[in-house]
Amino acid sequence: MSNSSILPAVTLDELLAALSHSSALIEAAVVVGCLALAWLIVRLVRGREVPPQSVWFGRQIVDGVLFPALALALAYAARRLLPVMGVPLALFKIVIPVLVSFAVIRLSARVLTAAFPHSRVMRLAERVISWLAWLAVVGWITGLLPVVMDELDDIHWKVGGAKVSVRSLVEGALLTGFVLVLVLWVSAAIESRLLRGAYGEELSLRKAAANAVRALLTFFGLLLALTTVGIDLTALSVLGGAVGVGLGFGLQKLAANYVSGFVILAERSLRIGDMVRVDGFEGRITDIATRYTVIRALNGREAIVPNEMLITQRVENSSLADPKVLLTTQVQVAYGTDLDSLRPKMIDAIRTVPRVMADPEPSVQLSAFAADGLELTISFWIVDPENGAGGARSDVNIAILRCLTEHGIEIPYPQRVVRGLPADVPARPSGGPPGLAV
């Protein structure tokens, strides 16, 4: 029988024999003390109020990153002290890998939840990471993991002048994933600090800086991960050329959206909070990401617009240089109404509406001689278009109606004049010109 098949069984038997020793009770008490001390420290540091979406603390004490990290540090310190005190180690051979796995799972879960709060793919990624972490713990405790890694190291080939094995690829993938999680964590923390208390133009600039920091951290993190595993970066030159060709052809739309996102944030032609109309969709910009922009309409619907569309197509921005927006409404009054005395009264009534600006002041103009009366066009300005135009126009119409009612001004109904033919004129047969038959 080969050594690879005997090693796990022997290691497991030795571990079970050590756990049956009386010193295992001392180790268990030390482990419980480490967990209790870690819980107490996190509880004191966190305080009563839990920060929202906190990676360190989580929603509870044990589901953040700080608790397993402190427990792992305390357990590792106890593992170094117990042999000095003459206590043989058995339980800590299981506790340390379990705490490492627990810390990795909590770190990945909290970071992915904070970075992608509504993504179902991230939920699946959390489960995959949890299964891999626990399987690695079982393999390490039983001694199977080192054997498997040695077998994977024997499967290798050369890429250029570098030796690449299956083990290096697995380790590279794991290390790259860990680096990406750390990059997401750091970039999310930097973005949160940059966007805190920012508004309008300053918010867009800080958003651009946050996106640039995330891109740079991701790039250098991947380079560091590949270098740490031992992969020669010069061997990836051919792959880099292929990726460049792919970006030039198959991924040109995706690359254009990313470049357009940075251009929009740098030029500040569109800012978070602006009221815009794009491709017939009108709403307020709530987020400008590197690939797309989120526009939220007043009725709650949201449109995800690729950034390239905002660069290449016409975009109406109601608040680029000035947030003030001109609104109009119309009303008819009867012929013979004294407009010289009515217009100042209507302007005073419109000024009472809270959302109407006093400067520029509202105006009432005679726009047309309609069939049923004098048509008046009322113009007024608002400074908060993000709250919608319908409510402001409705309030102005109500104020105008109240003003006309108070002063006895009639809003004319449609009028038609019907003239009958004399009795001695014979009626034309049906089918004649319309309007001549009686």
Image: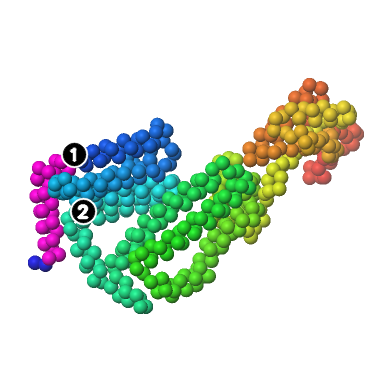
Q: Which class describes the residues within 10 Å of circle 2: few (<14), some (14-19), or many (20+)?
A: some
Q: Is residue 102 above or below residue 354?
A: below
Q: Is residue 299 above or below residue 48?
A: below
In the image, which is nearer the foreground, mark 1 or mark 2? 1
Q: Which residue is under mark 1? A: 29
Q: Which residue sits at x=70%, y=35%? A: 393
Q: Which residue sits at x=19%, y=63%? A: 147
Q: Position of residue 231 (x, y in %)?
A: 36, 69
Contact flag, marks 1 and 2 (Cβ < 8 Å): no
- Residue 387 belongs to the span the image colors magenta: no
Q: Which residue sits at x=69%, y=33%? A: 355
Q: Which class describes the residues within 10 Å of circle 1: few (<14), some (14-19), or many (20+)?
A: few
Q: How is the image coloured?
A: rainbow
In which quadrant of the rendered view does residue 367 lie? top right
In which quadrant of the rendered view does residue 143 lie? bottom left
> In the depicted view, which residue is nearer to us: 233 or 325?
233
Q: Position of residue 40 (x, y in %)?
A: 31, 35
Q: Which residue sits at x=32%, y=53%? A: 129
Q: Secondary structure at mark 1?
A: helix
Can residue 303 be seen from the camera position used here? no
Q: Which residue is under mark 2? A: 138
Considering every residue shown, the one lying at the far front of the view is: 84
Q: Which residues are magenta?
A: 3-28
